[in-house]
Image: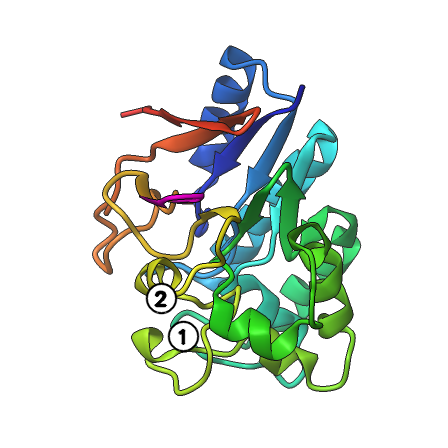
């Protein structure tokens, strides 16, 4: 059986790697899935950004059991010209960051599916899926369907569309959906785990047939004070457990 450690938004925090290594060993996990946002943070320069990203990518590649899901702060670096929505984009280092992601593209995915559960950066809403996915799609096919969208003409904008809760005027995409938008319009009978929306600790929202979790607990305020407690999630045969570290 597969035990998966779910890790929230990285945002240029190399100290997370030691914590994740320790938790992975303590819980004998089979796989690690990061929920995105490896780039950009308050008060970090381009050199700090690229050094931290390089350490993460090399670490994940060496472990061999890790999938990195695209976040909105990451995937925008793959566009040329860039889609510069949100804070922190480093234009001067964009080519280097893009090259790093291309070099380690085998680690990167938009979503991960297992046994009725979808893991992504921000989550899948009915609004977005009904407009952009084929009729009668299956949840298990969503990761590959997103790959197809990303390679299609105009796909970059579809995957990065921003809803009203995050200051946009479009449908909330799997890279940009706010937690409030996901809870309001989540897919029915598909459980999801996401990051993207900073929380003080991992949070859960449940309705009959559907379970949602948010694990963005490493983000900080603009003065670098932590918002959350760094807690993470362990997925084990459909059961989700909070892992407290602070």
- Position of 217 with respect to 173 (left or right) is left
Which is more toward the observer, 7 or 53? 7
Tell me which corner region of the image, top left, top right, bottom left or bottom right, holds residue 144. Answer: bottom right
Q: Is residue 245 above or below residue 150?
A: above
Numbered range of the magenta stretch: 206-212
Percent coordinates x, y for residue 67 in the rendering:
66, 42
Percent coordinates x, y for residue 127 in the rendering:
48, 74
Percent coordinates x, y for residue 175 in the rendering:
51, 65
Q: Is residue 153 above or below residue 9?
A: below
Check if residue 226 falls in the magenta segment.
no
Q: Nearer the viewer, mark 2 or mark 1?
A: 2
**Which quadrant is the C terminus positioned in?**
top left
Q: Is residue 223 above or below residue 243?
A: below
- Which dot marks residue 154? none
Residue under the image location 21 percent in, 48 percent down: 225
Residue under the image location 27 percent in, 38 percent down: 201
- Mainly helix, strand or loop, the magenta region? strand
- Give the SS element for disc 2: helix
- Position of 159 with respect to 103 (left or right) is left
* Colour setup of the view: rainbow
Viewer can see residue 189: yes
């Amino acid at each position: 059986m597969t035990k998966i450690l779910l890790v929230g938004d990285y945002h240029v925090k190399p100290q997370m790697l030691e914590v994740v290594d320790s938790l992975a060993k303590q819980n004998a996990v089979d796989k690690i899935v990061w929920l995105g946002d490896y780039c950009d943070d308050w008060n970090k320069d381009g050199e700090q950004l690229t050094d931290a990203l390089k350490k993460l990518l090399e670490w994940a590649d060496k472990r061999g059991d890790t999938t990195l899901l695209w976040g909105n702060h990451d995937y925008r670096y793959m566009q040329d010209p860039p889609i510069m929505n949100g804070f922190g984009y480093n234009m001067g280092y964009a080519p280097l960051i893009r090259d790093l992601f291309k070099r380690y593209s085998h680690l990167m995915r938009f979503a991960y599916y297992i046994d009725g559960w979808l893991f992504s950066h921000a989550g899948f809403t009915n609004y977005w899926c009904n407009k952009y996915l084929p009729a009668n799609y299956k949840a298990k096919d969503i990761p590959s369907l997103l790959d197809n969208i990303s390679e299609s003409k105009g796909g970059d904008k579809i995957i990065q569309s921003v809803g009203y809760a995050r200051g946009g005027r479009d449908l909330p995409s799997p890279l940009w959906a706010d937690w409030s938008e996901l809870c309001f319009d989540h897919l029915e009978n598909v459980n999801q785990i996401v990051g993207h929306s900073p929380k003080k600790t991992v949070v859960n929202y449940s309705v009959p047939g559907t379970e949602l979790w948010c694990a963005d607990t490493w983000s900080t305020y603009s003065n670098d004070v932590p918002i959350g407690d760094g807690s993470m999630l362990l997925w084990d045969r459909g059961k989700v457990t909070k892992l407290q570290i602070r």
